[in-house]
Image (tube, helix red, strand yellow):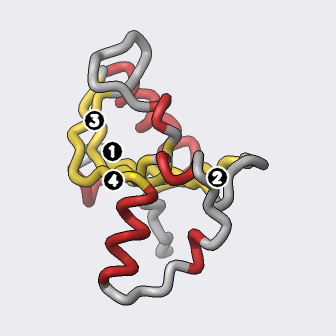
């Protein structure tokens, strides 16, 4: 018997005010040494440079605003149709790629969600 293993799961926000599709994905599993990785778009108020109770701690690999991402794509000559309906508020949203580093209870919950979807 062969089974395709699950590599992660995604969240898609329903945000009537956003001019594009907000998504956030979590990748975890043995191929990543069980270190969860996250990637996606967040509103600026969902991030903090200071530790907060109940918030996850990230080791950030990449972070940029939607405005910076659009400018970078345009410089490369890449068509940015994904962002065709972006509002002024959306330009401040943050694209993030990072590893989840803690706290332990958050890591535990992510692994439980992973096994709950396998």
Which label sits on residue 64? 4
- Would you identify the image quadrant in which residue 32 lies? bottom left
Q: Is residue 13 visible?
A: yes
Picture residue at 57% right of the left edge, 54% below the top: 23
Q: Are marks 4 and 2 in contact (CB under 8 Å)?
A: no
Q: Would you place residue 109 above or below residue 117 in this image? A: above
Describe residue 20's horizontal placement relative to residue 41 as left or right.
right
Q: Position of residue 30 (x, y in %)?
A: 28, 54
- Secondary element under disc 2, as helix, strand or loop, is strand
Which residue does the numbered mark 2 point to in the structure image?
12
Crowd band around label 2 with a 10 angstrom C-alpha radius: few (<14), some (14–19), many (20+): few
Q: Are marks 4 and 3 in contact (CB under 8 Å)?
A: no
Give how far apart the Cα atoms at labels 4 and 2 are. Answer: 19 Å
- Would you identify the image quadrant in which residue 105 lies? top left
Q: Would you place residue 77 above or below residue 56 in this image? A: below
Picture residue at 56% right of the left edge, 42% below the top: 116
Residue that sits furthest to the front in the current view: 88
């Amino acid at each position: 018997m062969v089974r395709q293993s699950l590599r992660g799961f995604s969240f898609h926000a329903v945000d009537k005010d956003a001019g594009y599709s907000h998504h956030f994905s979590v990748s975890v599993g043995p191929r990543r040494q069980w270190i969860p990785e996250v990637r996606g778009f967040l509103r600026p108020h969902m991030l903090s440079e200071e530790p907060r109770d109940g918030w996850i701690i990230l080791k950030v690999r990449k972070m940029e605003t939607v405005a910076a991402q659009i400018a970078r794509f345009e410089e490369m000559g890449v068509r940015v149709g994904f962002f065709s309906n972006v509002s002024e508020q959306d330009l401040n949203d943050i694209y993030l790629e990072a590893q989840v580093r803690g706290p332990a209870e958050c890591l535990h919950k992510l692994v439980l969600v992973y096994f709950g979807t396998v």
